[in-house]
Image (cartoon, rainbow, N blue to C red):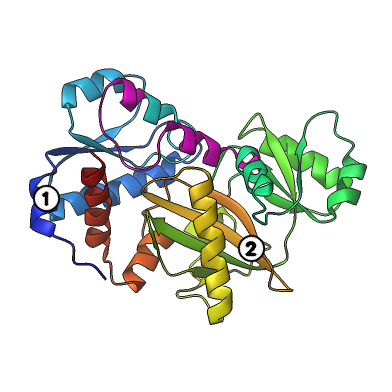
Amino acid sequence: MRTINREKIVANCGHVIVLKGGDSAEREISLLSGAAVYQGLLRLGIRASELDVGDNVVKDLITLDPDLALIMLHGQGGEDGTIQGLLEILKIPYSGSGVLASALAMDKVKSKLIWQRLGLNTAEFMILNESTDWQAAIEKLGVAVVKPVNGGSSLGIAIVKEAEALKKQFEIASEFDSLVMAEKCVIGSEFSVGVIQDQLLPAVQLNTKREFFDFDAKYVDEDTEIKCPAELSEDKQLELNELVGAAYASLGCEGLARIDVMQDQDEVFYLLELNTIPGMTDHSFVPMAAKQSGLGFDDLLLRILELEQAAS
């Protein structure tokens, strides 16, 4: 692996601000990610501040006058291009993907439509609304995964098998987002792959005793089984890497991201979603995969900072 020039990167950082919190449903995880990143910056000897983003964000940013913003805002307002657009207006450089890529990745329908157009495998889906024929939808999809179109951390997501349950879960998911979708459930193994620009991190394989990898499985359960690197043959690992790399490039992503993929019982891969601001908590997959590849948490931060300095 290429050597990271810590001294040079730290010297060129200036004032780095960590944006965290916000008012999305993923606020709790964002606060944890932001705190971990902030502490990492301090360990590296970087002049850093942290900001819990609220109604006075413009005034706060102008007052703090950072040289770079590290965005750790998960969910709406953070991953959807909103804060990226604000930072563009304020002429503050920031980490990760730009406005368009962030908005496309946040919208699961838009990203899946692009992947379908490019021939990248992703599960069949449909948009739900009050007038949906629930029985027809179940007959079309079979077992379905209902999820908010814009959202993450598996909030508002559930697997349903009957029309009545589909309608009920639609109502629950609608509390998280005005747009709700149902996706054909892929039965098999789930994988999560981190990307840092042109570098793919080792795939993480997820196993849970729950029906699927929900919020509690990700952030609460201690018995969730996580394997890194994943148990894949060389050919299948190559196939997964090619699919992930193509998905990342198709949306115009930059910097750090994480792509979630299902593999069915016939070993066929299906793209689930792309996260442009993956979690950085002690339960998060990207730091885990980075460590497996030889990048400790602080080195991962240095790599992110290095990318932003090279782009400026």
Q: Earlier in the sequence, mark 1 or mark 2?
A: 1
Quarter residue 95 falls in: top left
Dividing the picture into quadrants, the one containing residue 104 is: top right
Label 2: how many Cα within 10 Å (few below 14, some 14–19, many 20+)? many
x and y, in percent, of residue 144 in the image: 78, 52
Above or below — where is 233 with respect to 129? Answer: below
Look at mark 2 in the image and give the residue it sits on: 262
> Label 1 belongs to which residue?
10
Q: Give the number of callouts.
A: 2
- The residue sitting at 37% across, 36% down in the picture is 21
**Helix, strand, or loop for circle 2?**
strand
Quadrant housing the C terminus: top left
Q: CA distance from mark 1 to mark 2?
A: 38 Å
Q: Is residue 153 visible?
A: no
Question: Residue at the front extreme?
Answer: 118
Residue 289 spot, x, y in % from top left = 39, 67
State yes or no: residue 100 in magenta: yes
In the foreground, 168 or 116? 116
Q: Residues within 10 Å of mark 1 (few under 14, many from 20)?
A: some
Q: Are marks 1 and 2 in contact (CB under 8 Å)?
A: no
Check the picture and name the quadrant holding the N terminus: bottom left
Question: What kind of element bears circle 1?
Answer: helix
Question: Label 1 amino acid?
Answer: Val
Whether residue 247 is visible = yes
Residue shown at 24% from the left, 23% from the top: 60
Residue 43, image quadrant: bottom left
Residues rendered magenta in the picture: 86-109
Which residue type does callout 2 highlight?
A: Met
